[in-house]
Amino acid sequence: MKTTIIYAHPWEGSFNKAILDEAAKAAGDCYVIDLYKDGFDPVMSEEDLALYSEGKSADPLVEKYNEILDDTNRIIFIFPVWWYDMPAIMRGFLDKVMLKGSAYDSDETGLHAVRNIEETYIFTTSSTSTDNLVHRFGDAVNGPIIGATFKAIGFHNAVWDNLGGIDGLGRQEREEHLAKVRTVLE
């Protein structure tokens, strides 16, 4: 099974980086798309938008990322939850890379996935608790991301694991979380 990890965190010293390292070890042979290191521009330009309906982009990274996704059976997203949602660079990845013809097709009944990625994992961290994210702040991951976007683009069997309250956690709790990531992905 070919695994692709989509990673979004700008700081090498973050706990998200530790999750990335653990996930990459557990996944074995995998692609890592590090959006910040790649210098990915999440902004949909006028030129991008003009090409979007043709399933194309002016951004060369979009083509590279789609080639990687075409060879993917399992996808892993790793990012912090900022303002109760994914960072803008991750949202931009979905906006720009999920192109008509490669990620989805559409007709009068709606969007239909082109890809069939069998396993989808989302590992996030947040300052607030997971319970608050789900019950007080709109449940952005389970609702719009998993329930709508991922379904429309063929990212199946999505599992979300958030380490909430990260600011107050000690080393032991963080190590336990990394062990859980390893167990889930092996």
Image (cartoon, rainbow, N blue to C red):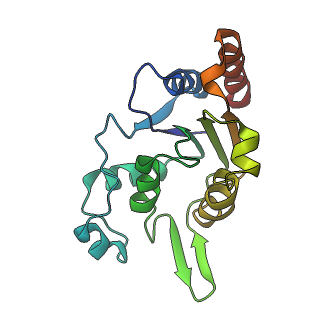
Tell me where residue 2 appears, x and y as whole percent: 56, 39
**x 50%, y 64%: residue:** 103
Q: Please name whichever residue, 140 or 106, is drawn nearer the observer in this view of the structure.
A: 140
Residue 11 at least partly seen:
yes
Residue located at (63% from left, 54% from top)? 140
The x, y position of residue 84, in whole percent, is 59, 47
137 or 186, nearer to the observer? 137
Q: In which quarter of the image is the C terminus?
A: top right
Q: Which of 129 and 159 is in front in this view?
A: 129
The vertical placement of 52 against 146, above or below, is below
Residue at x 58% of width, y 21% of height: 22
Q: Where is residue 105 in the image (x, y as percent from the top left)?
A: 52, 75
Image quarter in which the N terminus is found? top right
Residue at the top extreme?
172
State the residue in front, 86 or 1.
86
Q: Answer above or below: position of 158 versus 6.
A: below
Q: Quadrant of residue 161?
A: top right
Inspect this view and state whether residue 158 appears: no
Q: What's the residue at 26%, 57% (across, down)?
A: 59
Percent across and percent down for residue 120 are 64, 46
Count the labels in the image.
0
